Image (tube, grey):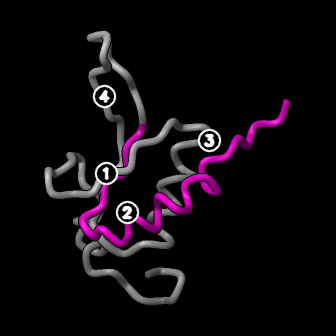
């Protein structure tokens, strides 16, 4: 992890963040309340495994489509850590 001055080999070779969500990744779906960069920066700084971060569409009971953000992780423990911290990361930071 970069905050401990250790280079992550996956990050060095550009293999850490994926552009698609593999089926074996553990997904955490949530409604985005802050900037996307705040969530992705937290993942880059605090976790070390491969991950996917992007849009996720699901079919609801009324045959409509629901849109959410999704963060999926190869390491299930990192998905648990993210799910526990998402309320602290995903806060309204807009001032009215």
Mark 3 vs 2, N-terminal side: 3
Tell me if I can see residue 94 in this picture. yes
Residue 96 occupies which quadrant of the picture?
top right
Q: Secondary structure at mark 1?
A: strand
The residue that label 4 is drawn on is 57
The residue that label 2 is drawn on is 79
Q: Residue at x 36, y 49 (%)?
A: 53
**Callout 3 touching callout 2 (CB < 8 Å):** no
Rendered-image quadrant of the N terminus:
bottom left
Q: Report the span colored magenta.
A: 69-96
Q: Is residue 71 above or below residue 17?
A: above
Q: Secondary structure at mark 4?
A: strand
Q: CA distance from mark 4 to mark 3?
A: 19 Å
Q: Nearer the viewer, residue 17 or 71?
A: 71
Q: Secondary structure at mark 3?
A: loop
Marks 3, 1: nearer the viewer: 1
Q: Position of residue 14 (x, y in %)?
A: 25, 65
């Amino acid at each position: 992890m970069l905050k401990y001055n250790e280079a992550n080999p996956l990050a060095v070779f550009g293999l850490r963040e994926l552009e698609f969500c593999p089926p074996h990744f553990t997904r955490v779906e949530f409604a985005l309340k802050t900037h996307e960069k705040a969530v992705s920066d937290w993942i880059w700084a605090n976790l070390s495994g491969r991950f996917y971060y992007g849009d996720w569409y699901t079919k609801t009971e009324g045959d409509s489509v629901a849109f959410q953000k999704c963060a999926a992780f190869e390491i299930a423990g990192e998905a648990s850590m993210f799910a526990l911290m998402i309320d602290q990361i995903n806060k309204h930071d807009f001032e009215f």
